[in-house]
Amino acid sequence: MSISIPRGTQDILPGEVEKWQLIEAKARELCEKYQYQEIRTPIFEHTDLFSRGVGDSTDIVQKEMYTFEDRGKRSITLRPEGTAAVVRSFVEKKMFGLAGQPVKLYYMGPMFRYERPQAGRFRQFVQFGVEALGSNDPAIDAEVISLAMNLYKEMGLTQLKLIINSLGDKESRTAHREALVNHFKPRIGEFCHDCQNRLEKNPLRILDCKQDRDHELMKTAPSILEFLNDFSKAYFEKLQHYLTQLDIPFEVDANLVRGLDYYNHTAFEIMSNAEGFGAITTLCGGGRYNGLAEEIGGPETPGIGFALSIERFIAALDAEGIELEVNQGIDCYLASLGEEAKDYTVGLLQQLRLAGFSAERDYLNRKIKAQFKAADRLKAKYVAILGDDELKNNKINIKNMATGEQVEVDLGSFVQYFQGLKGEK
């Protein structure tokens, strides 16, 4: 009986994985420029972290988490998102006491959600995200947004749309919450079961419902922007000022609420406008989460962050027809004729690699013609040909695959000569 891959997962094969590596490398490069440092947290955490941190009323906690009981009878969950774990580490390792504040972190790795697989959505997916903890300055909200936008732009994406909203502070949200309950309560029976449950727990989540999004009450629901107090208004206006200063176009969407309970003040999403990208256009989402650190046992700590899916990043590149140069070819392929020459290339290959070159040789006893074909497949810039006769004479031939030029050099100085050849390019 054959064993197939679990539904909602994928194998990322050579030829494709290089795209991932390029995106990951660019993300790390940008984080270094922005002074964000990498953090790696466990793939599984205590379930309580997510039920308290992400929110009991969210779809993630109610429907999508991979939760199991370990041998110690503890409830464990495969991480469905990255922020809660990063903040847990921030609190547990007392990073709030570090001299350098705010603490700016990034992460990259697999997340797990049990949801219906579809284009761009998997049950195991890879997220890149950043978190900035310890600052209430709207300028750092703008910085976080600019990091995400610049990552997409530097990889070539142009069909992007940034939408922002303010969820306000606690006072603003409380007033808005009361207005939402009063708005939906008389006709809540017309909404789905989930929305009925959300009415008292978190009515803001009703606005994020996909099933009832066309209901007439959705279109007339009170906007959070109508309930922002003076502080929340000033904060949101300052964020818009900074985005304009950074030359980042944006749209304000009062219906943007995000799917996690811990957000307040700034909320944002970056979407793809590329034709044919699909029904789910969101590439990246994030926002401010003042209060999350306290929720999981830490001191009062403001925070802001985002997360993006690498899978959807690649889908957006494909939708815009952007080809990443993922195979630059190897520096040298060692072709051999004869047993003694073939044996000698084992050590010669090692010398090339230790000198810093990408190199390969034949392992299938192929004829010389087939070895050249293999060199072509690997996009070798040079092929070094060593036969038994050349080995006896301490010689080796080097062929430039772009020009067809071929030279014979002393075998003993081959690596040094090759270094000179590469140095000329």
Image (cartoon, helix red, strand yellow):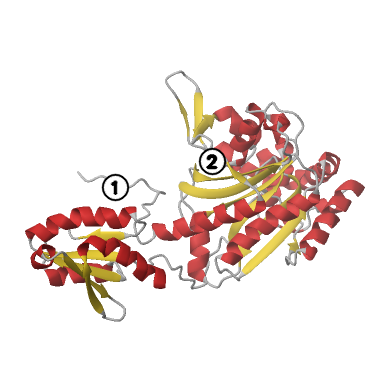
Where residue 298 sits: x, y (%)?
71, 28
Nearest to the observer: residue 138 or residue 273: 138
**Residue 131 seen in render:** yes
Q: Residues within 10 Å of mark 2 (few under 14, many from 20)?
A: many
**Residue sitting at x 22%, y 60%:** 412
Q: Is residue 405 above or below residue 365?
A: below
* Residue 272, horizontal then vertical, whole percent: 59, 65
In the displayed structure image, the side of residue 292 where residue 357 appears, left or right: left
Q: Quadrant of residue 17?
A: bottom left
The residue labelled by disc 2 is 80
Where does the C terminus fall, quadrant-wise?
A: bottom left
Percent from the top left, x then y, of residue 395? Answer: 17, 67
Label 2 SS: loop
Name the foreground residue: 246 vs 406: 406
Q: Residues within 10 Å of mark 1 (few under 14, many from 20)?
A: few
53 or 97: nearer the viewer = 97
Q: Is residue 210 something one can see in this rendering?
A: no
Give how far apart the Cα atoms at labels 2 and 1 are. Answer: 23 Å
Q: Say which label, 2 or 1, has the lower sequence index.
A: 1
Q: Position of residue 324 (x, y in %)?
A: 46, 68
Judged from the image, the secondary structure of the residue bearing numbered disc 1 is loop
Q: Amino acid at mark 1?
A: Ser
Q: Relative to 43, does residue 255 appear above or below in the rendering?
A: below
Q: Which residue is disc 1 drawn over? A: 4
